[in-house]
Amino acid sequence: MRRFSFLAIACSLIVLTGCGGGSSGSPVPVTYVPPTSGPFVYVMDGGFNVLQILQSQNGVVAPSAAISGPNTGLQNASGIVRDASGNVYVAIYGNSFIGSEILVYPPALAGNVTPRLVIVGALTGLSGPFGLAIDGQGRLIVANTLGNSITIFAAGANGNVAPAVTIAGAATTLSSPSGIALDAAGNLYVSNQSGTITVFAAGASGNAAPLRTISGAATQLNVPLGLCFDAGGNLYVANENSNTITEYAPGATGNAAPAVTIAGSNTLLAEPQELVIGSGGLLFVTNLSVPGVPGLMTVYASGAAGNVAPVQSITRMIGPIGISL
């Protein structure tokens, strides 16, 4: 099951600040010329920062902009997504000190900025939110890992507001849902940490049974977290426990073997969390824990398979988790 080791991440932050981080001894640069144009990728890291990173970045992370500071409310965060207007949504998983909530920031990543909207309270149904997505209507879709539910909020939702739609109940077979993604038809794909992918029809609500389920030994699913689709409709899954990325053909169902697997020591995968397809079909993956390094984003060429080395690796982040374009 998914475990958040935020004390360890905080300790990594202290180490990184004190000695330059990692095992190379090279200090993190404190001055740089920020890139002025994208494309960018946006990463939620465990150091309580949202980082805007140029997709062509390689080596020590040099964000061109960030959300960071005590006014942001960023702590115990997990998923991230941006809407069509560039607003940034962050899931706060919650712990014994803070409750589950969704924070929404304006498009400009302006440092120590206060959220413009906060979805929080008993009516929201939020319970360990992790994966986030925005649908074609601008609604926010949330996978609640602790609540075994999917909650969908109207565009602009704020405060202690009830979701417009909730998917929950025995028929859904949701089991610690974590990652979510929408296909071209609007069908909702959900990763369950129990080792399955459940697919719900567009417009599903209540105690709805999934259209399809990807499940079984042949699937190689092992605590699946992040999900994404490429332009051809192939589904990519980050498997935390096996340090693998598995890819499934459009329409895969049942005990389906992956069409492609990225796995092995050359890949540098280490507790992969979430993933997105960026410019040129590049696959960006956040890795929570890398030996000797607080965190790493690995980037793979389109069509990568097997024990392949990343074409880029972005280092010195603090336990990167969520990622979005």
Image: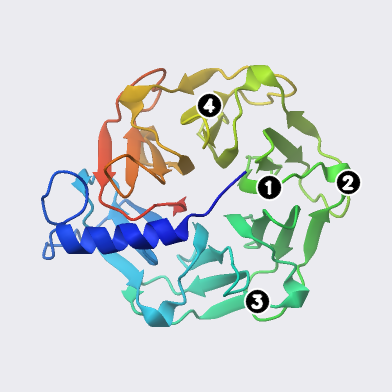
Work out whether mark 3 precedes mark 4 in sequence or the reverse, and give the earlier one: 3
- Circle 3 packing at 10 Å, graded few (<14), some (14-19), many (20+), is many
Q: CA distance from mark 1 to mark 3?
A: 19 Å
Q: Which mark is residue 246?
A: 4
Q: Which mark is residue 170?
A: 2
Work out whether mark 1 precedes mark 4 in sequence or the reverse, and give the earlier one: 1
Q: Which mark is residue 132?
A: none
Q: Which mark is residue 177?
A: 1
Q: CA distance from mark 2 to mark 4?
A: 27 Å
Work out whether mark 1 precedes mark 3 in sequence or the reverse, and give the earlier one: 3
Q: Quick one: SS at disc 3? A: strand
Q: Label 3 near label 2: C-beta < 8 Å?
A: no
Write the residue at 41% across / 82% down. 71
124 shown above or below 62: below
**Where's residue 14, x and y in %?**
28, 64
Query: Is 59 situated left or right of 95 in this image?
Result: left
Work out whether mark 2 precedes mark 1 in sequence or the reverse, and give the earlier one: 2
Query: Is 86 situated left or right of 18 in this image?
Result: right
According to the picture, the residue beneath numbered tag 3 turns out to be 120
Kindly tell me whether residue 109 is visible in this rendering.
Answer: no
